[in-house]
Image (cartoon, helix red, strand yellow):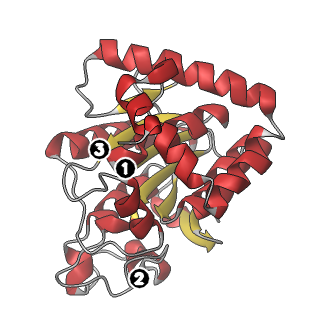
Amino acid sequence: MSALSIFDRLHFLRFSIWDFSFQSLKQQYGRDFIRHIILRHPIKTAKGIIGYQIAKEKNKKADTDGRQFQFPIPSTPLVMDRDPIVGVGYCMKPDTPACISGKGNHNCWFFESGAYLKENPPLPDSCAICPIRKIGLQSFAAGCHYYIMTSAIDILYDLYLPALNKRTFRKGLFTLCRYSFEPFAIACSIAELEGVMLPFSKNDCADYKTWLHADDGFKEEQTELVDESYRVISEILQKSAEITKRDSGGETNSKKKYKKQGNIFFIHYD
C-alpha cells in the first residue's frame, strides 16, 4: 500500500483523494486542472475546498449513508431553477442489446434524432430499456441541459470551466461512480456549482486502474442506480418541471427542444 493510499484511509486533512490526485498528474486532465483552475483561480480553489469540507461534514450528519451527496449544504432540497444541467455517466448505456449510438461517447440517438419530441415513437430495443433515455426525458421536461459524461478531461472543459468562468451552469444533478465522488464534488464546489450527486450501486469503478480504463471509454459492464436514486431524480426534476411550466406561463414542451452544442444537449426555446 502506498503512503498516499494510507493518507486516503486516514482521511488526511479530511480528504480521500490523495492517491487519485497524484496519479492524475500523469494524465492531461490532472495537469490541465492545475493549469486552468488551481493556478488561475487560487482564491476560488481555496474557498471551494473549504466549502467542500463543510459540505462533507454536513452530509455525514444528514445520514444519507452515501446514497447521495449534496453541495454546498444538504439543508434544503435542490431546486434546478438556475442554469441547470443533468449529467449521467455513459456507462449507464445498455450492453444487451448494445446502445446503437455506441457506449464510450456523448451521443444518444433518441435525443439527436428528435424522437423525444414525438408521442410514443418507435424505439430501438436498446433505447426502450435505457436509463439515460428515461432520465433525459425528465430533464427535458424540467428545462435542464443534458450531458452524457465520459472522460475527466471532457468534463473539465464541458462542465467545470464553463461553470467557473462563465456561470454557464449553476445547478446540477449528477450520477457517477463512487470512486469519482470526492474529486467531482471538490471541482463542483470550486466552480460554485450547486447540486446533488447520486452514486452507482453496481459495476462502478473501485480503483484508479479501473477508473482510468473507463475514462478512456472502455467500460464493459453497465452501471446501475438503486430505486431510491431514481426516486430522488424524479422528485427533483418534477419540482423543477413545475417551476419551468409556471415561469413559462404554462407553455408546452412544443416550444422547447434540445440542440447539441459540443458534447452537451442544451435546452433551446423557439
Q: Which mark is residue 4?
A: none
221 shown above or below 84:
below
Which quadrant of the view contains residue 63? top left
Residue type for callout 3 = Ser
Q: Are marks 1 and 2 in contact (CB under 8 Å)?
A: no
Residue on which disc 3 sits: 234
Callout 1 crowding tier (Cα within 10 Å): few <14, some 14–19, many ≥20:
many
Residue type for callout 2 = Trp
Callout 2 crowding tier (Cα within 10 Å): few <14, some 14–19, many ≥20:
some
205 shown above or below 72:
below
Residue on which disc 2 sits: 109
Looking at the rendered structure, the secondary structure element under dot 2 is helix
Looking at the rendered structure, the secondary structure element under dot 1 is strand
Residue type for callout 1 = Thr
Which quadrant of the view contains residue 249? top right
90 shown above or below 86:
below
Q: CA distance from mark 3 to mark 1?
A: 13 Å
Q: Position of residue 218 (x, y in %)?
A: 38, 75
29 shown above or below 59:
below
Kindly tell me whether residue 203 is visible in this rendering: yes
Residue at point 47% right, 51% down?
Answer: 86
| Residue 28 falls left or right of residue 112 | right
